[in-house]
Each structure stands twice: as structure tokens, then as C-alpha cells.
Amino acid sequence: MIITSKRDYPLTKGFPYSLEHLQASYCRLARIDTRVLCLKKLRKLDLSHNHIKQLPATIGELLFLQELNLHDNHLESFSSALCSSTLQKSLQCLDLSQNKIKALPIQFCQLRELVNLKLDDNELIRLPFKIGQLDHLRFLSAARNKLPFLPSDFRKLCLENLDLFGNPFEQPNPLLPNIQLKIPLTLLECAARAAVNYR
């Protein structure tokens, strides 16, 4: 189900309980509707471009939720309770970009199934110190934040794509030269690298 305006948002009519994908963008929502939190089969939830300031802990009761998009809201934090919820086993894609988040809780690294994490355009002054525990993380973007450095655990990540553009990193940042992206190579690239390595 896709809703892209406040006018189309159902006020009296409920959502189908069997719903697996819900997008409610540009609806001027200040909070997450409790009816949404009752959709136990939900796999994809897109609440981007709203006015949401806080996330209820009950989101963590959505057992099958794989994708959560909260882009362009008014969030200032991400609840540690959510990190300890059933989202640990289900959540793969999380978009928190364009909010007002200054830091993520230490417990954030319990979301071990994350593959894609978007943190761009926040006010982040640090990343979780144990971020290297996100074993499945392959895509990370945290551009245009206030990060002065990266935690040492960062080098444990096996990323395919990384975007840290527009952060005020202290110079020199000793971690940056040691970050190697695990990018799938073409056969030609593999041959070229092998030729260089065995000269």
C-alpha cells in the first residue's frame, strides 16, 4: 500500500492485517500510527518525509520487518530498546538519513543483520565504537555529518560501498588509509591486480 499525501491517509478505515509493504510518505505524521504497529506481517515500512520525532519501542514487535525508511523526519535519537528487540534478527535495511540524530546508542551494533545503513545529513559526532560487529553490513553512508574520526572497530567492516563525504575529519585520520572495500571485481580487474602483485 502506497500513500503519498495527508489527504489520502486513512483516518477511520484500518489497514489490512495481511499488509507486507506500507509506504506513508508526505503525510505530515508527527508520530507513528498505532494501527501500523499492529501489522504483524509487515516487511517494508516507509515513513519518509514526515515530522516524526520519536520511535515507539513497539516497532520492535514487528517480527518480520526487514526494511525501515525514516528518511527526512525530525528524529533526534534512535532508541536502545529497538536495538534489543526482535529487529536484531530481521532488520536488513535502515534509512535514518536527513534527521537530527547526534549519536547512536552502543546497543545499535546488536542489529547484526543490517546490510544497508543510511545516516547521511544528520548531526552525528561519532559512530558506535563496536560498529565492527555489524558483520553483514555492506553499504554504509554517513555523508554530511560532524564526524571528527572513525572508531578503531571500523576497520573490521566488510563494506562494498562507503560514503563519508562532507565530514570534518581531523587530519590526518589514521584509519582512512586502512579501509579496504570488499568490492566484487570483474575478471579484467582481477587479472590486472594479479599482474601488479606478481611483478
Image (spheres, rainbow, N blue to C red):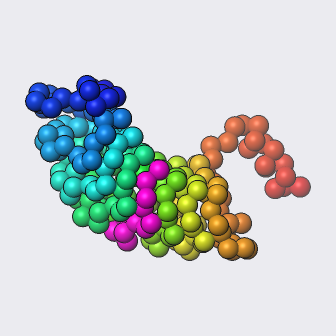
Give left or right: position of 42 versus 159: left
Q: Position of residue 13 (x, y in %)?
A: 11, 27
Residue sitting at x 55%, y 60%: 145
Question: Residue 79 is drawn in which quadrant?
Answer: bottom left
Residue sitting at x 72%, y 73%: 171
One can see residue 160 in this view:
yes
Residue sitting at x 26%, y 27%: 7
Residue sitting at x 51%, y 69%: 125
On screen, 152 above or below 23?
A: below
Give left or right: position of 2 versus 179: left
> In this picture, which residue range is highlighted in magenta?
98-108
Q: Position of residue 161 (x, y in %)?
A: 59, 49
Magenta span dominant secondary structure: loop
Q: Position of residue 46 (x, y in %)?
A: 34, 38
In the displayed image of the protein, which residue is found farthest to the right?
A: 199
Q: Quadrant of the N terminus?
A: top left
Q: Quadrant of the C terminus?
A: bottom right
On screen, 46 above or below 53?
A: above
Q: Residue 105 colored magenta? A: yes
Q: Position of residue 12 (x, y in %)?
A: 10, 30
One can see residue 89 in this view:
no
> Depth check: 26 or 199 in front?
26
Q: Residue 144 colored magenta? A: no
Give left or right: position of 168 versus 132: right
On screen, 29 above or below 13?
A: below
On screen, 182 above or below 107?
A: above
Give left or right: position of 97 versus 184: left
Question: Residue 68 is drawn in which quadrant?
Answer: top left
